[in-house]
Amino acid sequence: MIGNSRKLLSILGPYTPAPWREHYSLSRLFFNFYLLVMGSFVAIAIFADFVISTAVKGITDDYTSRFMHGTIVLIEDELFRKPRSKWPQAVAALDQKFAYRLDIVDRWTLHLPPKQAEKLDNGELAIDAKGDVLYHRLKQTSQVLVVGPISPDRNPEYHRGMPLDLRISLLTWSLIGVCLAIAVWLWVHPVWRDLEAMRQTTRALGEGLFDARAPAMRSNAFGPLAETLNGMAERIQRLIATQKELSSAISHELRTPIARIRFALEMLADSEVPADRERLWRLMEGDLDELDGLIDASLTYARFGREQPDLQLTAVELAAWLDEQVEASRLLEGKLDLQVDTATLPSMLYVELDRRTMPHAITNLLRNAMKYAQGKIRVSAQVDDEQILVHVDDDGIGIPADERERIFSPFTRLDRSRDRSTGGYGLGLAIVQLVMEQHHGTASAAESPLGGARFTLAWPLSQSVTES
């Protein structure tokens, strides 16, 4: 067996965990998120500006036409007071008096959009696509008065360094960028801190440190994730501890019956007396029954500890259900006086419980009481403080106060119960505890009015309904 194990290990080779990243880069996370947010903001702003400019362009052009109409008519009147040969000199003189350029060009040299060309030919003011240059056809001529660009920033004669609107835009976008960077930092830094804490926790769990837990998250987005991770870690830790405990305890429990069987086999080989051989056979059958019971109890405990199945609640009448469970165990009671007392329960009290798992709790308590009772066992039930209480009392040796919590741990047995007749495997009460946890209840031990031990099952009354 050892040789096969070594051969298997040599084939598989030693386990080498994958390398871990050192840490999350705060600067990289910040800049990536900042560029994403800032880029999205700029794209939205540009698109909004385009939509708004397109929507108001007609209104702006109409306002510009009405605003400049009087000035252009005055310029036209001034030109018609002079011969056409003098128009270039007149326009040049007027150009010196205005903050925007004036010029006269032939109609055929202009290439305007069809709508603006039609307006120009009809004697109305036409405006270029940028809304900054106006065109007016001089009366009964093929020449056009060109006014503009009106904006000083487009007039080369008035350029003075960086345009004002550009400076305002740069200042505005700089302030927006700084404010956005501060906002992104205030959001990213807690997220990074929580991510780093989660990374450290998952790394510790990956390295086998199952007691590691994620700290409280400052970001609401990671709070549920941290709770889920901690719950998973606790579950894994409990499962691994249960498996180790089961493996260790089962190994220890198997040694005694196996040693007895081996000794009986050796005695059987040397014995020729039929009576002795029959006795040895019975001893080995008892040891095999003990091994079978140990395996069955271990599998039951492992199933409850591993699966934690969902409750399949069924409404049952509590008094009748208790009678049914007790009657199923009467064959094991021998000469014991087994009583059921449900007189304090309300009439026709129906409770909701899982009919697959709750019988395990009642049966294990009854079996435990039958091992230690001197002559009397009593099962009773009551409703107290919004809870259902089921008591199993016996008149046995009882349980010391300092052992009453530990007795529900798996493979825990009191020293005085280690004899073969009553020792058991230390799993019955552990199974009871798991069943009650499944029902959101508790199992506890105390001193019994009969003088021995009292075991109490308690679960919330909110799962109960009463029929009148």
Image: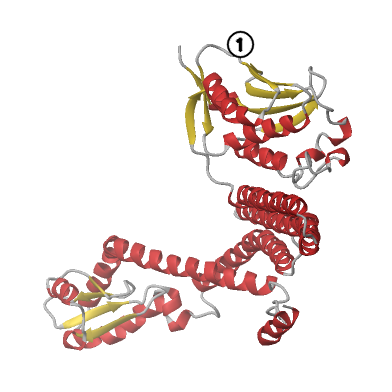
Quadrant of the frame with the C terminus: top left
245 up-or-down from 37: above or below: above
* Residue 4 in picture, x, y percent from top left: 70, 82
| Coloration mode | secondary structure
Instruction: Please state if 443 lies on the left or on the right of 113 as rendered.
Output: right
437 up-or-down from 106: above or below: above
Q: In the figure, residue 123 lies in which quadrant?
A: bottom left
Q: Secondary structure at mark 1?
A: loop
Name the amino acid type tagged 1.
Answer: Ala
Q: In the figure, residue 9 lies in which quadrant?
A: bottom right
Residue of label 1: 343
Residue drawn at (52%, 35%) of the image: 355
* Residue 264 in picture, x, y percent from top left: 78, 58
* Residue 156 in picture, x, y percent from top left: 44, 83
Instruction: Please state if 169 lies on the left or on the right of 299 as rendered.
Output: left
Question: Which of these two is toward me, 234 or 457?
Answer: 457
21 up-or-down from 416: above or below: below
Q: Is residue 51 visible?
A: yes
Question: Which of these two is toward me, 328 or 81?
Answer: 328
